[in-house]
Image (cartoon, rainbow, N blue to C red):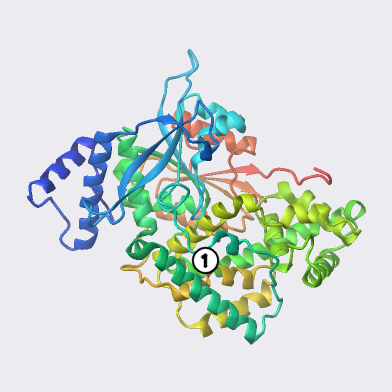
Amino acid sequence: MRAAAIHGTLGALALTAATLATGTPAAADQSRPAATTAEQGTAVAAAEAAAAGVDWKECPPREHLPAPAECGTVRVPVDYTQPQGEHIDLTVSRKRAQPTEGKGTRLGSLVYNPGGPGASGMRFALYGDVLGGVWKKLNRRWDLVGYAPRGVGRSAPLSCQDPKQFTAAPNPSPRRPSAEYKEQRKEHAASYAKGCAKAQGTRLAHYTTEENARDLDVLRAALGERKLSFFGVSYGTYLGAVYASLFPGHVHRLVLDSVVDPTPSNIWYRSNLRQNAAFEQRWKDWKRWAAKHHRSYGLGRDAQQVQRSFDEVRDAVGKKPAGGEVGPKELLAAYLQTGYADSVWAEHAEALAEFRKGRPGPLEALAAPDPARAVEDENGQAVYNAVECADARWPRDWSRWDRDTTASDAVAPFSSWENTWMNLPCAYWPTTPRTGPPHVGTDPGQLPGVLLLAGTRDAATPYAGALETQRRLPGSSLVTEAGSGTHGVAGGNACVDRHLAAYLLDGRTPGMRAECEGRPAPRPGA
């Protein structure tokens, strides 16, 4: 809703850093001076991180990560072209591997990014304990390492407005926004962008995916790893693909789950337009499922009738917000989740059905903003905008946005306008990308085997993204969950999880392509 660098060991990185410190020019590609400067800065920061390591301690209460999880920080430059300039600390979590006697030794650190951009991976440290399954199996031999990317959580947090204002509810969401409403949204987007600039100043230009990828290499060095093993989901797949393209010689294991299309011309304006159509298809999937179970929910016997039931509720909360907080915008945000996972389908159908029977409680619980999450939610949205707006040039002409969204809305009315309002700050962003999106791609043989996981009906990252990434990363393997729209397929499909474990524990890939049967549709009341 996101060129070859230095290929060497830590010793080579330290040598580069020492060379720079004495003022002797390091070897460089003279045709790309800006990229070479950033590469040198990364080498300096990585060498310093390798020397410092991570001072692991008990996690602070705010992280909600009890022992045996540990927490620490890693120092990274704000701007890699100025490695001795301003720095920030990234927060990191870890649960050490627990090898079982006779079943292998520790394999190293597995670093996780859950996507966003703007999501924190700190909770990954406890996936094995909390979620079990394949995660517990992996934690026997891998340290599970999560982190909060720059701007997220306690990693020099970015905020663009008062969190209470960000989560203030209820809010309208007109099906056909008027000229007056569009002007209001434009003013809000411009004000929001201005707030980001005021809060961050010169830092705002340095939330790019490329700089996040360079942060990963510094984190790798701080963990004492010669090569990075990385698990990225959603936007995390784009981050991982950019890392692999910048540092192919630093990759050990790379898992990309629910894969972003990295084509530069799609980043990020066009990819959001393509998401609209994909979410419309998933919305239809949910409506067909609800219609199939009309006897349980009474929402309609076909998808059109279910849509009318939803529209009636949308109109009702527009006139009288449920619980005083759930208006049309909150309703749409809650039901967008049906596009991410089938596991929420029953709960959402039940809430809609109960509301229509005069019992709004379940819908209020589902869709009302949670004050306890206000700071985290506002922070996540701020980093989302900061990264996507900084990564690429967005249209600055409102007429382009208006024209494209109107066309999208004609075929994908469920989310088109709300998606535009979320991304519109990029039309007024106070910084301009210095370059276009980074090239994603490697030559044959540059990377070890890479494992891609994807569902064919994924809405947030349409399946075509996995095919394009496989084309750009020669030698990678793609495991497909057929007929599935679940976003983030690992950890819930036994077939997928077997391929994941074989790859991460033994380095075995299934060849170019493998297909797993999609998980069954949920039952009413699940």
Q: Nearer the viewer, residue 266 or 44?
A: 44
| Residue density around tag 1, few if under 14, some if 14–19, many if 20 or more, within 10 Å | many
Q: In the visual, does 240 lie left or right of 52?
A: right
Residue 313 visible at all: yes
Question: x, y percentage for residue 370?
Answer: 66, 53
Image quadrant containing the C terminus = top right
Q: Nearer the viewer, residue 475 or 317?
A: 317
Name the residue at 77% across, 63% down: 324
In the image, residue 183 sits, relative to residue 382, either above or below, namely below
Q: Amino acid at mark 1?
A: Ser
Name the residue at 46% across, 51% down: 152
Q: In the visual, does 109 lie left or right of 321?
A: left
The residue that mark 1 highlights is 271
Residue 32 visible at all: no
Q: How many marks?
A: 1
Question: x, y percentage for residue 385?
Answer: 48, 63
Quarter of the image for residue 312 reads: bottom right
